[in-house]
Image (tube, grey):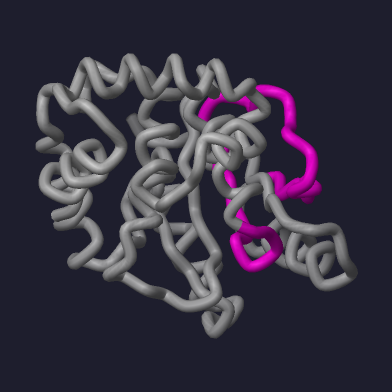
């Protein structure tokens, strides 16, 4: 179903600044959307259905990214996500950790490119490259064991893949170390491994295309 341009809200999630406010004003005047600046350090309430979210990864760090990934995966309403990164690295796997991605921009992109890309998403098109679209299609063929994991277990597994310790996972997700251990126990059981090393090998063999 196509998004209704007249009813679309575009959340610009970044650190408040004069530059950010100017960008919001430009997007509101150049596109048929209501652009709203949202402080990246604060989770927002459930956005309206069909919202667009422009998330600025250049204004945050990996810990905040992980928290936002968890938050966005729990949102019950439909939305489309656009990412702004330091560079447009189409070979990186980090983009697959985000839900409903429809666009990837970088700091070097000018306002015209950004507006053109957002307008394509408003028309229910992807503004990702053919290479990224293909990689997303490939990712849809997840192994069955992975589909058995809860969203939180997937986050824990991916954090484990990146070398995070139990303490780091607990701190990032605001959960206890005992809860982390419980998640790992369930993950190991579902993907049929016995320890962290085997789990990391399983991820590398099954989730890295």
- The quarter of the picture where the N terminus appears is top left
Q: In this picture, is 46 found above or below 43?
A: above
Instruction: Using the rendered view, name the quadrant where residue 86 is placed.
Output: bottom right
Q: Is residue 75 above or below residue 24?
A: above
Residue at figure coordinates x 43%, y 63% from the top left: 104
Q: Is residue 173 left or right of residue 162?
A: right
Q: Residue at x 24, y 61 (%)?
A: 132
Instruction: Tell me where residue 170 appears, x and y as whole percent.
Output: 60, 31
**Magenta includes 109?**
no
Residue 35 colored in magenta in the image: yes
Q: Farthest residue in the right direction? A: 18
Q: Is residue 6 visible?
A: no
Magenta region: 34-61
Report the front residue among 144 and 35. 144
Instruction: Decide: is 58 above or below 102.
Output: below
Count the marks: 0
| Whole-percent x, y for residue 166 in the image | 52, 35
């Amino acid at each position: 179903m196509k998004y209704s341009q007249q009813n679309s809200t575009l959340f610009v999630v970044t650190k408040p600044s004069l530059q950010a406010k100017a960008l919001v004003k430009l997007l509101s005047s150049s596109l048929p959307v209501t652009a709203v600046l949202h402080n990246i350090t604060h989770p927002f309430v459930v956005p309206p259905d069909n919202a667009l979210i422009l998330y600025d990864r250049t204004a945050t760090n990996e810990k905040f990214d992980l928290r936002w990934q968890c938050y966005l995966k729990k949102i019950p309403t439909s939305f489309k996500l656009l990412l702004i990164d330091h560079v447009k690295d189409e070979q990186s796997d980090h983009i697959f950790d985000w839900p409903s991605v429809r666009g990837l921009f970088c700091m070097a992109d000018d306002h015209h490119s950004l507006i053109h890309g957002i307008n394509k998403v408003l028309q229910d098109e992807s503004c990702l490259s053919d290479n990224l679209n293909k990689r997303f299609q490939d990712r849809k063929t997840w192994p069955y064991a992975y589909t058995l994991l809860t969203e939180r277990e997937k986050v824990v597994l991916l954090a484990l893949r990146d070398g995070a310790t139990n303490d780091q996972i607990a701190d990032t997700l605001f959960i206890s170390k005992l809860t982390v251990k419980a998640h790992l126990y369930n993950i190991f059981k579902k993907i049929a491994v016995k320890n962290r090393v085997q789990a990391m090998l399983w991820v590398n063999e099954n989730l890295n295309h």
